[in-house]
Image: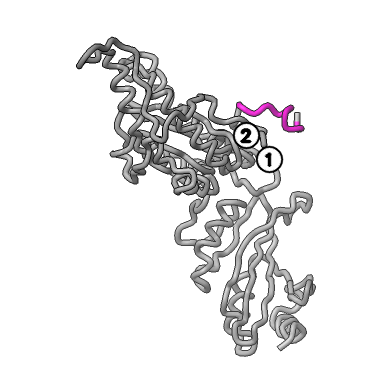
Amino acid sequence: MTNEIIKQRLTEKFGEQVAAFEESYGMLCFEAPKELNLKVLNFLYDDEQLKFRFMTDLTAVHYPDQPGRELVVVYHLHNLVDNIRLRFKVFTDISQPDIYTATGLFSAANWMERETYDFFGVNFVGHPNLKRILNVDEMDYFPLRKEFPLEDQTRIDKDDEMFGRG
Amino acid sequence: MARPVSYNLIHKPLEADISIANLPDGHQGEGFFATKLNDVIGLARKNSIWPLPFATSCCGIEFMATMGSHYDLGRFGAERVGFSPRQCDLLMVMGTIAKKMGPVVKQVYLQMAEPRWVIAVGACASSGGIFDTYSVLQGIDQVVPVDVYVPGCPPRPEAIIDGVLRIQDLIGKESLRRRNGDQYKALLEGYGIQ
């Protein structure tokens, strides 16, 4: 099986809705509307030929200069039979970051979606236990969104001028 | 070769193979020695510290070297490392403390019995070090009072030993009334303890 066949199977099923196919370092990558994310994942899982039945990673990326599609949720899938991997992206508006949860399909998605919520504030609709997993519970922002500076803003002991950012 | 940083500021020349703790000030004659209770207790306490290692990263590895035969912290009466806070006098925090770990450090401190001392080993425990970021506690003195800070990233075993010697110095000179004083109470109050 090759990336061409995967692409062909996806376009047969979803037509124009799957788009932006690209191959970086031989790894197929494509995107779909966020309402379709479960349909695409289910199709990739159930299809007799594709068999993408292992989720290696789930994360998000923040692109602040793309209005209307600031947040991307990225799924890394692995076909263990043919040893082929792919990336699947869904874009969402940051003002309403609701994405259907993949926990019904992959148990591995449970903690990874909690992590993605923790750092990017993606609201996974239907997740059984969507709360912070790595950061302190009292944290009131999503630290990997780019509007937040990396440094701890509550500190008073380090003078900014001494660190070249005065 | 001269070292760029000079440790062991308290000079104590080696006079014999076995060195004995200095006698406190007092009056002595044949068969008796009179001194202050404060000094005797200080002498006993400072030479029998039970450290509690709270090692979270590379400074902890340096501490392992410090406890090993080459540097041997046991020479200073701190041989017995306890792993229960109930038994220990000296909390040694070595390594990066994430904000999520902060309450754990505080709880360990609360479980120790008075008198207790705290030493922050390394840049991370002292100030957050290179981790100027949202997830790292910027120095453990935000959650517990600290007596001695050891700089370095990580500090060499000599530096850790020097820190322990300074703790010994503090312990030896500490007034027996200090822990009941208003100033100490205010200090703990500042950390929301009691």
Q: Residue at x 42, y 43 (%)?
A: B53
Give the side of residue B75 with respect to residue A145, left or right.
left
Q: Residue at x 33, y 37 (%)?
A: B88
Residue B154 spot, x, y in % from top left? 58, 42
User: In the displayed structure, would residue B138 be above or below residue B185?
Assistant: below
Q: Residue A114 shows which numbered tag? A: none
Q: Quadrant of residue B178?
A: top left
Respond whether the residues carrying marks 2 and 1 are from the same subunit: yes
Residue A15 spot, x, y in % from top left? 74, 79
Q: Quadrant of residue A13?
A: bottom right
In magenta stretch: residue A163: yes
User: In the displayed structure, would residue A41 be above or below residue B62?
Assistant: below
Q: Residue type at mark 2? A: Gln
Q: Residue type at mark 1? A: Pro
In the rendered view of the protein, which quadrant contains the N terminus of chain B?
top right
In the rendered view of the protein, which quadrant contains the C terminus of chain B?
top left
Numbered disc 1: secondary structure: loop
One can see residue A137 in this view? no
Residue B121 spot, x, y in % from top left? 51, 37
Give the side of residue A72 with respect to residue B50, left or right.
right
Instruction: Read off the residue under disc 2.
Output: A153
In magenta stretch: residue A62: no
Q: Please state the extent of the stretch shown in magenta in the rendering.
A: A157-165
Q: Residue A149 shows which numbered tag? A: 1
Marks 2 and 1: CB-CB under 8 Å? yes
Between B11 and B60, which is closer to the camera in this rendering? B11
Numbered disc 2: secondary structure: loop
Give the side of residue B137 with respect to residue B174, left or right.
right
Q: Residue at x 56, y 35 (%)?
A: B138
User: In the displayed structure, would residue A126 be above or below residue A131?
Assistant: below
Q: Chain of mark 1?
A: A
One can see residue B149 in this view? yes
